Amino acid sequence: MAILKVEGLVKTYKDLKALDNVSFEFNKGILSLLGPSGCGKTTLLRCIAGLEVPDDGSIYIDDKVQTSIRETILVPPYSRAIGFVFQSYALWPHMTVYKNVAFGLKLTKVPDGEIRKKVIATLDLVGLHGLDQRYPSQLSGGQQQRVALARSIAMEPRLILLDEPLSNLDAKLREEMRVELKKLIKKVGISAVYVTHDQEEAFVISDTVIVMDGGRILQYATPDEIYNRPADQFVASFIGRSVLVDGKMVKVDNENCLVAVPEFNNAVLVCHRPQSGGAGDPCKLVIRTSEIKLNSKRFESQENVLEGSMSGRDYRGGLTDHRIQVGSREIVVTSHKLCPMINVDNDGGKIFLHIDPSAISVIIDKPQAVPQHAGG
């Protein structure tokens, strides 16, 4: 049984279609809604919470209808048995940590004795033991985020919604908190829908990811599948460090295909065969630059070796961006200081690139059906 089911959701603001017939099912675990600003992910989350009313469509939580525009059903947010963690945390500044976490329980008439047990147990769970009498202003950003999460967990929802809950934290704390947040959600045993524009954050925290743009779902899959097999050009360009080039399939066999790339001086690359397409079809190649090998000397392999010239190197502490001109395109290959894939002994001159077929995704230049469900 799906913990969350969305059918045909439409939401328009004046001339902007924020949600364009969005449908999907989510069974359990952590699902991230990923996409750039304005793609519709926060609007979708707020519709699920009951904070926005869609123009059309239905929403089911735990197999119970919460929103149905055609049946004129709209369950209010406080009756949806969900938790919500806002981007701003939305803590009451005049209330202690204890009172903030207890607030929702008091509204639902839980007895005082039970409230105290739930609040103290939840604060212990999120690592805030002994801080129950402090005020939000006396807490760090990470601690405030934990209070907001504790307030939702204390209500014991089946589903918790999180709207970019780590965006107010500094980079180092954000990296630490996303790991801790995932562990905590798994430990509590609830499911979560998590909104973010950060691909790395979505991949770290999620079991499945929905990539959105223009109010539509472009791909719904595991992080591994989205990274290695992007469904369309936008997903490919949005996910990870990659270069997108035009190509033409010149030969197809059972497992592989050959693709000619005009921008790479008409080089022909061996790629894994896509699910559709044949010889003569135009396509896009998504090349993951973090998986490219560089060498000042020619590789022994004769397959997928390109010749280019080093146009510059940018040092970023422990990382280096190698800028390689190949034909009419510049490729930026980022490496760690001791990366064994990079063997470059000068800042200029001839450079050879080796691209394994596993580092390339082929996208056929034809409309594709968008998957509306992913397992987990």
Image: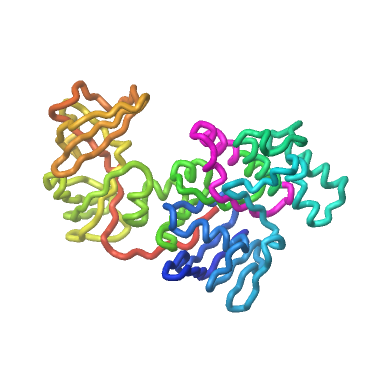
- x 52%, y 43%: residue: 167
| Percent x, y of residue 338 | 34, 22
Q: Say how many tags the image has.
A: 0
Instruction: Give residue 289's quadrant in the image.
Output: top left
Q: Is residue 158 magenta?
A: yes
Question: Where's residue 294, x and y in %?
Answer: 23, 30
Confirm whether the magenta stretch covers residue 172: yes
30 to the left or right of 154: left
Q: Give me the residue at 44% from left, 63% from top.
A: 215
Q: Identify the residue at horizontal 71%, vertical 60% (top origin).
A: 78
In magenta, the rendered stretch is 154-182
Closest to the observer, 67 or 53: 53
Residue nearest the viewer, comparing 30 with 298: 30
Q: State whether residue 336 appears in this view.
A: yes
With respect to residue 72, does 270 lie above or below? above
Question: Residue 9: x and y, percent?
Answer: 52, 68
Give residue 350's quadrant in the image.
top left
Left or right: residue 41 versus residue 272 is right
Residue drawn at x 62%, y 78% is 71
Compared across the picture, whether 44 is left or right of 251 comes to right
- The front one of 245 and 277 is 245
User: Quadrant of residue 240 in the image?
Assistant: top left
| Horizontal and vertical percent position of residue 126 | 68, 37
